[in-house]
Image (cartoon, rainbow, N blue to C red):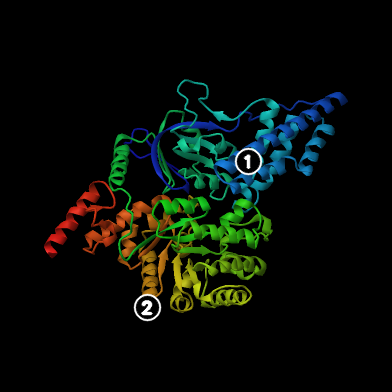
Amino acid sequence: MTKNPAGNGGQKEFKGLSINSGKVVSRVCVYSGRRHYEVAARKIDSEDAIQEELRRLDDAIALCSKELEEIAERVATEVGKTESEIFITQMHIISDPIIVDEIIREIVHEKKIVETAVATVYSRYEEKFLALDNEYLSERSTDVGEIKRRLLDKLLNTKPGFSCDGQSHCTRGNERVIVAEELTAEMMVHMNLEHVKGIVTEHGGVSSHAAIIARSVGVPAVSGVHGIYKQVFCGDTVLLDGDNGVVIVSPDEETVRRFKEQEVKEEQEAPLLSTPAGVEVLANVSLIEDVRHALAAGADGIGLFRTEISFLRADRLLSEDEQYALYAETVQIMQGKPVTFRLLDVGGDKSLPFLQIEKEENPSLGWRGSRFLLGSVDIFSAQIRALLRLSAGADVRILFPMVIDSTQSQKLINAVREIMATVDADPDRVKFGAMFEVPSAFIQADAILKQVDFASIGSNDLIQYLFAVDRNNESVSDEYNPEHPALWSVLAQLSDAAKRAAKPLCICGEMAARPGMPSRFLDIGITSLSVSPLLIQRVKHEVLDYKRIKNKPLNEAYIDDNAGVLKTKGKLSDRLLQDRKKEKDVNR
């Protein structure tokens, strides 16, 4: 979807899908992942020629396998061992005997040169994956296409790269926003990610392997920006808003000025080391790397650990011991701060292909969330046992995803307690929580809150189900409205129910970090906000401003009385310190 606001002198606004948060204004580097769009269909006509093509195939597979092994080692060192499994998986695919046999048949029986045979077979598999009515599986076509291009690069002696590569002004992505057709893992490892300022792509979704890498290294990214690849050139300027999935090409002076003013304001309002009294700002995380970022950003804890992402990255079920190691490391990193682990949230746009779940007409309304957990005893039990083992040395917060009603909530709690009787666990250190994401749960809020120890709100799915709107469908995306009075009515009702039950309530959907939203949540009594680690300080600043405007007392932790300075920096800090000293003088 493209917008051309009147009077903006060529400024074009594109809407896509947020892959990773963050905002930046920068020049562009265009990355071409395909230098061989067409392969000549040349036939071979002799046995010697066939043997030569088979030899070339063997050589290309051997070279690509070695290259993938080297990349896997580099990624394991620089990014993480789990991320390196992406390339190990590609090593297995590239030497898969079924695929190799199909290529050989194309060469031997169809008399095709090896380039044509490779393109034919891998394109066939790409189309099969793309045709699947499942977002995660269809995105695997990216991996198949990447292997095809890697083999063709070797066979044709070509390689992907930047459009301006070799020209004097080319920076190879350093200090630039990368624009590409797809966010491939191949593209990611050939860039110095520490110096890339953002990534914009036409294709690829939130669960692609490379999107996970982008989030793990903190690169702002927006995907699904249709048509942008042909709209920009190396050196153009873009404003990338990863928070809202917006890309503005050739932003006008007024747009850039507003952005820079906001940037300067946030810079002056330097990070606070504490959170105002009565409020907690937590982090939503998917990876161990996110956990470290959250701690460094001053998170008061982890409000939502999306455990399913570890399964997606590994492309297999994780054992109980593997899960325990992951969860234990998370708790250790957070140094005693609370950590909420959401149980495996499968279904909708987060299917696990290795589970071989039957295709559903409407997966968003099908076997997902807590329905899946109750129907998958072995998977559920292994994850619960791994989490309960943590209670020997830490408090454990277990969050049930997409709870439908109080009956389902009670079934989940009973199932955990049955498992608890078989594990060396401390029941007093285990807390249960329900995720409120569907209207039926809100209607039964009082009953559910009596059963659990805490509650969380998943605003992303709540908006979808409350208004029957798919936020990724451009035809109706305008109706995905976090400002709608009906939404705020049900949120306020849930907040009141939580107060009556004296149970903590946290908002952990994307809307919690939107400018102005933290204040609105505080207004209706929701004082626990869980957001992306990148947005923690922004939310803390808004909460602090809200407290001051409402004449709420500042948290004493902000003031170091002995040093006589505020534990932060910038103009806002100076102003607060002056106000605080005036208050003390008056009190004397």
Going by the numbered disc 1, the residue's amino acid type is Ala
The circle on residue 9 is: none
> What residue does disc 2 label?
500
**Residue 174 against residue 398 in the figure, above or below:** above
Identity, as a three-letter code, of the amino acid under mark 2: Arg
Give the secondary structure at mark 2.
helix
**Where does the image place residue 384, in percent across and percent down from the top left?**
59, 68
Q: Is residue 18 above or below residue 65?
A: below
Q: Position of residue 22 (x, y in %)?
A: 41, 45
Please say if 131 is above or below 460: above
Which residue, as the protein is rendered here, is positioned at the far right? 47
Which of 44/136 is in front?
136
Mark 1: which secondary structure?
helix
Q: Nearer the viewer, mark 2 or mark 1?
A: 1
- Report the residue marked by disc 1: 72
Q: Please say whether residue 484 is visible from this viewpoint.
A: yes
